[in-house]
Structures are given as structure tokens and as C-alpha cells.
Image: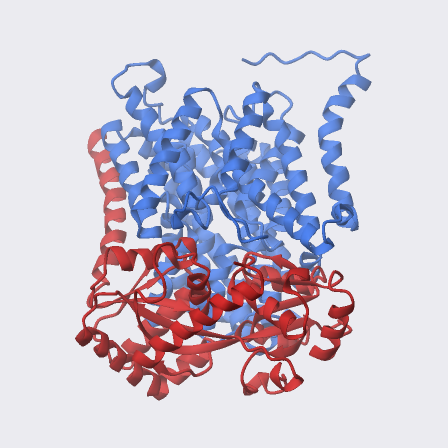
Amino acid sequence: MFDFLIQGFGVALTPLNLGLAFLGALLGTLFGALPGIGPINGIAILMPLAYTLGLPAESALILLAGIYTGSEYGGRMSSILLNVPGDAGAVMTTLDGHPLAKKGLAGPALGLSAVSSFIGATIAIIGLTLFAPLLAEVAVMFGPAEFFALMVFAFSSMSVMMGKDPVKTAIGAVLGVLLATVGVDSGTGVMRYTFGMPELYDGIDFVVMIIGLFAISEILLMLEHANRKNADDEIPPLGRVFVSLKEVLYCKGAIWRSGVLGFIIGILPGTGASVAGAVSYTTEKRLSDKDGTFGKGDMRGLAAPEAANNASAAGSFVPMLTLGIPGSGTTAVLLGALMLYNITPGPMMFTERPEVAGGLIASLYIGNIVLLALNLPLAGVFARVLTIPRWVLVPAIAILAFVGVYQLHSDLTAIYLMLIIGVFGYLLRKLGFSLAPVILGYVLGGLMEQNLRRALSISGGDIDILWQSGISLGLWIAAAALLVLPWLVPKLLSKKPREEPQQD
Amino acid sequence: MKINTAIRHASGIALLGGALLAGQVQAAGESECIAPAKPGGGYDLTCRLAANGLLETGLIDEPMMVTYMPGGIGAVAYNHVNGVRTDDPNLIVAASTGAAVNLALGKFGQYDADEVRWLGALGVDYGAIVVNADAPWQSLDELMADLKDNPGEIAFGAGGTVGSQDWMKAALTAKSGDINPRDLRYVAFEGGGEALAALLGDHIQVFTGDLSELKSQLESGKIRVLAALSEERMGGPYADIPTAMEQGYDVEWPIWRGYYMGPEVDDEAYYTWVQRLTELSESEKFAELRQARGLFPMSRFGNEFDSYVKDQVADFKSLAEEVGLK
């Protein structure tokens, strides 16, 4: 049964393919680390190169898959160090990653995220190897109604992020949902909030959104503080460089739970690393955050989204390999790459081209080990980014932001849009809003609306469809439980008053 | 010492960013193809078809650069070519039937189909009416009969919005069976892959996709293609699929993959490109490349293609009115 895997390791362990897996991992880490250049662009840049070099199909795929998984590793770097997500999956990583860096724990934070990325990805790759065909059947059971229920669940799990200022969190999420409504309405073909500008027909691009919201607003904040000498602005001490085993063990629950969760979300076509990161972070906060330390530099709050986004990257290969349906934007590009080689991924690939299917899965195992080996020692090097003085760092981030967005759109309007969103993000931050709910509202809200509309198109407007299947019913109950239990349980236990831990 | 290290790291990052940018500029060499979409979609493949084909057959010496200009389902690139790079002799832009639909619906802003110089098409794909392998319908007739009785019971889905070329396939099929397209239940997904997943999961009953994207599902026997929207039966794995025409439904939907140039490109440059693409389409090596992308032969170049597209846009304009879009 696992002949294809044995054959795959035979393919993946040839010197050329091993070298390509390493190259892909390295380049992917860099692409992920640079804001604006995510896995999709990395693959798009290198795809023609692989083809022009005349690499055989399995080698090209190994290189490109290395870039994909590598960029999920790399995305966390700027999240932790600069509070700017390197790619879509790394948004939640900023929440606890950056506070850790501010505490002088940048090195251990980078190390821990490498380890949790490794474990998360490993869980997912094993799941992919063992259960791929079975899981693919489950994945297609998710229709619009089920996705809508999943989004409701995701939103209700966000309620834990309410924190100190629930109203501002809610407003932030609603602003995100509003931004997601820009563009052509797919259900009717009507333009919404586009002001006649073709640049807005497709809505606000995700990369423009995160670069504007996070990178530009961060630059503006840095500029504002540039001439002030606050204790706050002091460059944090570099401290330790390596993560300790104790710290990893402290997070083990968070890592494996999030790995499994991320894998499941990755399998579903239409949801990717950003949703996986969000759901795993909020779930973990719900389960483990007894002392209210999440968001202030809790190791578990960093480990959870990192394990989840890597797991979802591997999970998105399930529908691609077994059904020929991309599980994420990046696998859609990979699917295009395979077509260049006249290979149509799908159920027949395991029997017709076992060297490609097996080689890819084997290379995921190898690439993952390469990435861990590459990223652990690099943690110390990258942590030094924090010692870069502001007058060098701010222009460097600005250059990356502009280059990243321009090379994606080849159009100045995208740059202006990025700047407008940046100023908007800066104002929000000055007013004490957290940006994570905005971006989550944007991602989840868009998916939620689309799937609601699709479900209602299917049923002809009958809303019963939303809770007709077992899956959606289960998600509705879970969502309701998430909202009600935290409020109900303390009331039931109120006879035994607990000491509220004091946190500022 | 500390500052030194810092600057070294910072310059490393800047260098890398610069290198990526320079890499793109340098690759420009002579010619450029704008793919008016994000990487990985059909327009990307259209550009790469020309880029790889021309390079491999030696019709161009330097690799052709592919630039992505997403936005407005092609409108941003169309406006760019009409407003900024109007006479660039080395620039071609990928287009398809989808662009013609959008032009007909006036979604490309102030410019219409007469503005640019339509260059030629290198390949074509065809629409297909697809159902799950477990579905009760064995032919288009059976589906249409059920649809006529209960238009509300059968949900169509595809990868494009209402008004897109994917939707047109569903609307025209309905119209060919005397069913009002407005009564049709149509579900818009993000890309053909999601729609196909919904079909496999029985969330929608009919998927109006393209033949080329169905190859692996056909082999696995999970779907049934009731009709190909082509003039005649296609070969290879599609040989058993009847056309809609032969089942008595007057609907055809070719999805050509071609290119246009700026409005002020001079005749010399235009005919150089026409010549290049014509030669390319005749080479054997290119036939392999085209097949690898799941496309069927289509060779229309120069003025012939120009009038083909303009006629098509005019047709779509009247169609859009008939199906209630305008």
C-alpha cells in the first residue's frame, strides 16, 4: 500500500532532488520572511525557471513544494521581530510573537516557532500519508452551508479576543467585514463600493490589506517615536538565542492540538493558513489562557498559530493530490505548474505517476527536517534584526512594502490603496484598536458572506439549509457553546468564588 | 561592531528586495506579456504558452517577461494599455472569451472592444455541462426535461460571478432549452476547483466548467459530462462526450486564449507579432505545449482575429440583453 512512498523516498533522496528540497526550503523561508512576497509569488517567480531549466516534473514539484512549506516557516520572522506579518498565515503570530521579542526573547520565540512549525507540519504530513483518500471524501462534504457554519464558529471563537475592550474588538471586526464587501458581488454581478474604479472590482487584495494595515501603520508609529526617547523604545536586550526544551514541553499541548486543527482546516478547499491560524489561536486561548497572559507574550500563543499554519499548508495538499482540487491559493498555482508537465493531479496520480505523488510526499518529510535544521540556528542571526537602528529599519521595511505590493500588481493604484489602508491602520492603533480583529473580520467575513449567499442560492432563499446537515448542526452547537459556556460555567460554580488573577 | 552587523543585515534585506526587483526587470529583455490576473490562473497560462512556445521554437531570443496586473477581471490591464503603454511594440496582453464578455457588458470602463489591436488566439477550450456520476441524468435531454419541470430544484454552479463567462454557459444552456435564465439557480464560486468540489459533494447538481479542467475527474469516473459546448466532438479522453448541438441544443461556448496589443502600436510591430504567432501555431513543438495545457487548436490571427473578437463582443451584447443582464 505504501509502495508509492518507498518509491517516493527513492526519488526524493537523489542528490539533485535533495539539493532542490534544500534550495526550495531556503528560498521559501526568505520569500515568507519578506512582507508582501508570499508563497504564491515565490512559486510564480520560480515556476518558469524550473520549467526552463528542464527539471523533471517530480524535481520541479519538490522545489516548489519546498518554497511553499518554507514560506510558512519564514512568514513568522517579520511577525515576531517587526510586528508585520510576512504572509497571510502569520497574522496571528504577531499577537504573542512580537511581545515576546519586546521582552528580549526574540531568539527563543523564533526557535519555538520553528519547532512548533516542524511538529505541526509533521502531524499534517503523517495525516496526509495515512488518510489522504479518506479525508478527501470528508472535505467535499463541506458545502456552502457547512462553510457558513464553520465561519460562525470561527467568529464566536474570536469572542475570547474581546479582552479588555470588547466594544473595540467588535468594532474592529465589523470594520474588517465592511472592507471585505468591496468589489463585485458574485451572487448578482453588482459592483459594491468600487466608485467606478476597475482596480476595486476584485475587492481589496489581501496582501495590500496586510501590508497597509500592519507594515505601513508600523512605519508611521516608528516615525512618530523616532525623535522621542521613551523607555519603551529602547532596543530590547537580545538575551538568550536558543529555545529551551522546557519551553517547548510547556507548549506541547498547544502544538499538537493546533497541528491537528490546522491540518483539518487546511484540507477544506477554500480555507487556508489564515483561517487555521485564527481558529487555533482562539481555541488555544480559550483552553489554556487561565492567567490572561495571551497577547502579552505567551509562548503557547505563539506556538499555536505556527503549528496550525504549517499543518494547514500540508493539509491543503490532500484535496489537490486526491481530487485535483486546490485546497489553497498556493496549491492552485502548484496545480498550474503540474499542468505544464502534462500531469493532472487527481485520484489517478498515485497509480499512474507514483514517482510524482510519492516524491512530493517524501519531499515534504525531507523538506520539513531541512527547514527545522535551517531555522533553529538562524534564529540567533535573525533575532539581530532587532538591533538594527530605526533609521535603517524603517526605510528597509518601507522599501519591502512598496516593492512587494508593486511587483504583485504592476499598478500604482495598489500602492495608493496600501497607503490609505496604512493611515487607516495607524489611526486605529492610535485610538487603541487592535488590528487582529480587523484582519480576521476581513478574512472570515468575506468567506462567511460568500458562503451564506451560495447556500441561499442553492436553497432558493430557504434558510433551513444552514442547519440541515450533521456537520453544520455540530458546528452551530459548538459555536453556541463557545459563547454561552464561559458565561454560564462561572455562574454555576459561583458558590466557590475563585481568586481572579491580577493582571494589568 | 554592533552597528556594523546591523547594517550588514539591513543591507542584506535591501539587497534581496532589490535583487528580486532587478530580476524582474532584467528578465524583460525584449518582449513582455501582461497577464491581467494573479499568478496561476488561466491568463498566467496564456502568457506562458506564448512565452515558452516562442522561446523554445527560437522565434524570440530573450525570454519573454510575464507581468501580473490583476484587478477588475482584466479591466486594469485594459485601461493600462489604452492609457499608458499605448504604443509599446514589445507588449502583448493575454485575453480570452471572458474579456470579450466583460467588454460586452461595459465592465472595462470607458474603453470598448474597438480600442485595442487584437492579435490572435493560440488555443481554445470548450465549455462543458457536468454532473456527478451518481446523478440521475444520462443525457442533456433528461436534465433539460427535469429543469423545465422544476427549475428551482436543480442548482447550477461554476467558478465565475453572475454575468461572467462561466455564468453565460449556464444561462445559454438554459435558454437553448426554452428555460428563462432568470429562473435558474446559479451559485458563484471562487474558481472552478471550488465549484467542482461542490459538485463532488452533491451541494450543486450541475457544474458548467471547461473541458480541460475535467481530465482527471473523467479518468476517475466521479463525474459525467452530459455535453461539450463545442462545434464537434473533441478527441482523446473526450471522444465519448456528445456535443450539445448533436443532442439538439443550440449552444456553443468556445473559450479562446489569445492576445491583444495597444491601440497605437504601428503596423510593422503588429504584423511582426502576427507573423510570430502564426509561425508558432504551425510548429510541432508548440502542438505539444498546447496539448499539455489541455487546449485545442485554434488559429486565428491578425485582421481575421480582430473581426472575430469584435463580432463576438457584438453578439454578447445582444445576448446579455436577452438573458436579462442589461
Residue A345 visible in the shown view: yes
Is B236 on the left-hand or right-hand side of B140?
Answer: left
* Residue A400, position as x, y percentages in the image: 30, 42
* Residue A327, position as x, y percentages in the image: 57, 57
Question: Is residue A179 or residue B180 the one in the foreground?
Answer: B180
Question: Is residue A334 or residue A258 the one in the foreground?
Answer: A334
From what the image shows, is residue B140 above or below residue A449? below
Question: Is residue B176 or residue A101 the one in the foreground?
Answer: B176
Residue B68 visible in the shown view: no
Is B49 on the left-hand or right-hand side of A279?
Answer: left
Coloured how?
by chain
Q: Residue at x 78, y 68 (%)?
A: B149
Q: Residue at x 58, y 84 (%)?
A: B237
Q: Residue at x 61, y 76 (%)?
A: A351
* Residue B195, position as x, y percentages in the image: 61, 61
From what the image shows, is residue A336 above or below residue B230? above
Question: Which part of the image, by quadrant, shows the N terminus of chain B?
Answer: top left
Q: Residue at x 45, y 27 (%)?
A: A100
Quadrant of residue B307 in the image? bottom left
Question: Which chain did the image draw in red?
Answer: B
From what the image shows, is residue B147 above or below residue A330? below
What colour do you see for chain A? blue
* Residue A11, position as x, y percentages in the image: 48, 71
How many marks the image carries: the answer is 0
Is A259 on the left-hand or right-hand side of A73?
Answer: right
